[in-house]
Amino acid sequence: MSQERTLSIIKPDAVSKNVVGQIISMFEAKGLKVVAAKMMQLTQEQAEGFYEVHKERPFFNDLVKFMISGPVLVQVLEGDNAIALNREIMGATNPKEAAPGTIRATFASSIDENAVHGSDAPETAKNEISFFFKDAELCPRTR
Ligand code: CMP
């Protein structure tokens, strides 16, 4: 297994439920480490830019509206196999299909308000991390 970094977003629904700490604990319990984190109120331009890959999808406008409806916590998680592990901990995109004990099964109410986002592949992770963080903002664990 290789050390990887992945981008994680705790979305406005989960922030508003005040479960940021519980969600981070679920990542930490499985060995992922936070190496960067910040709370942000995304602008419409940022949300549209981040989800540009979905711009032709019918849910795009609602997705952007939701992502700017309140603050989000964006973070970089590091660990063995971090990209796939993060996705496993999050559960399926649609919380109705998410395995019990996953973040989405526990905290998400619908496919539109699904608590968390995580990068889906190494190239996406690289691009998504640099969308939000400068290299100097990533803090390698030195101990
Ligand atoms: P996320 O992993 O952040 O990536 C895009 C988001 O679009 C997704 O989570 C869902 O919250 C939202 N979405 C809404 N409808 C759909 C759909 N039919 N398929 C995939 N994603 C959807």
Image (tube, grey):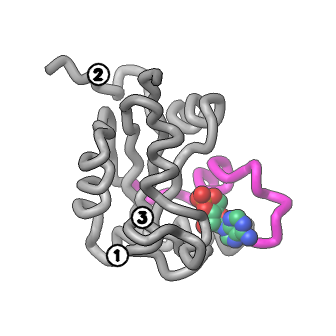
Identify the residue at horizontal 28%, vertical 54% (top origin). Answer: 24
Identify the residue at horizontal 45%, vertical 36% (top origin). Answer: 82
Query: Does the segment drawn in magenta span residue 78?
Result: no
43 left or right, relative to 80: right
Location of residue 31 with respect to 55 vertically, above or below: above
Q: Distance of mark 1 from mark 3, alpha carbons?
A: 19 Å
Query: Does the segment drawn in magenta span residue 44?
Result: yes
Sort mark 3 into few (<14), some (14-19) or many (20+) by Cα contacts within 10 Å.
some
Q: Distance of mark 1 from mark 2, alpha carbons?
A: 29 Å
Question: Dot 3: what SS?
Answer: loop
Identify the amino acid type marked 2: Pro
Identify the amino acid type marked 3: Thr
Of callouts 1 and 2, the N-terminal one: 1
Question: Dot 1: what SS?
Answer: helix
Mark 3, ligand 1, within 8 Å: the answer is: no
* Quadrant position of residue 77: top left
Residue 83 in picture, x, y percent from top left: 51, 38
Residue indicated by mark 1: 16
Where's the C terminus, which quadrant?
Answer: top left
Of callouts 1 and 3, the N-terminal one: 1
Q: Distance of mark 2 from mark 3, alpha carbons?
A: 27 Å
Identify the residue at horizontal 63%, vertical 54% (top origin). Answer: 45
Of callouts 2 and 3, the N-terminal one: 3
Front one among 118 and 44: 118
Residue 7 shows in the view: yes
Which numbered marker is on residue 140?
Answer: 2
Identify the amino acid type marked 1: Ser
Front one among 94 and 34: 94
Q: From the viewer's perspective, is the residue at label 1 or at label 3 nearer?
A: 3
Which numbered marker is on residue 102?
Answer: 3
Which numbered marker is on residue 92?
Answer: none
Q: Which residues are magenta?
A: 40-59
